[in-house]
Amino acid sequence: MFLGTYSPKLDDKGRLIVPAKFRDAFADGLVMTKSQEHALAVYPQADFLNKMSNLASAPNTLRQVRSYQRMVMAAASDDRLDSQGRVTIPPHLRAYAGLERDVVVIGAGDRAEIWDAETWNRYAEEQESDFSDMDGEFTAFTGT
């Protein structure tokens, strides 16, 4: 499970030092792709393949299913960490997420997410006002 918030920086070649706590999960490869709110989702490769296999069983006669499959798969990029624990973020994904130098990497349960630091701070601030109300909704949903 991916947990926590980290603030690495991109280097001039678009490489990101992956937080040490996440590296073991990505040891066999990773896939990064677009996510909502102009963030990037980063999955262990096996988990991404499993997720896409499940998605492939959804009825592609539905426009929303086709659109989601296209957006996620067309943007996806597979890679491996280099010997220094870095991964290169492809230019098309850096542009999508507005990544320059200052980024935030967050744990989001089954994936890590990469955000532009300013975008993440703004998003977190906006969500904070509703956060206390969310607990009751999710407690009902999860049964815990």
Image: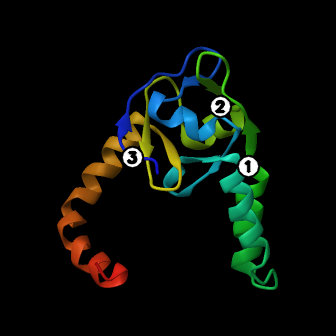
Q: Residues within 10 Å of mark 2 (few under 14, many from 20)?
A: many
Under mark 1, the amino acid is: Ala
Which residue is pictured at 75% across the width and 42% down the height? 77
Q: Position of residue 75 (x, y in %)?
A: 73, 49
Q: Position of residue 122 (x, y in %)?
A: 32, 46
Which of the numbered marks, if any, corresponds to residue 22? none
- First in sequence: mark 1 vs mark 2: 1
- First in sequence: mark 2 vs mark 3: 3
Q: CA distance from mark 1 to mark 2?
A: 11 Å
Q: Position of residue 62 (x, y in %)?
A: 75, 84
* Residue to which mark 2 is pinned: 89
Which residue is pictured at 49% across the width and 55% down the height? 37
Under mark 3, the amino acid is: Leu
Q: Residues within 10 Å of mark 1 (few under 14, many from 20)?
A: some
- Callout in the foreground (3, 1): 3
Specify whether 67 is left or right of 129. right
Quarter location, residue 8: top left
Which of the numbered marks, if any, corresponds to residue 75? 1
Under mark 2, the amino acid is: Ile
Quadrant placement of the C terminus: bottom left
State the colouring used for the structure image.
Answer: rainbow
* Residue to which mark 3 is pinned: 3
Q: Is residue 49 above or below residue 15?
A: below
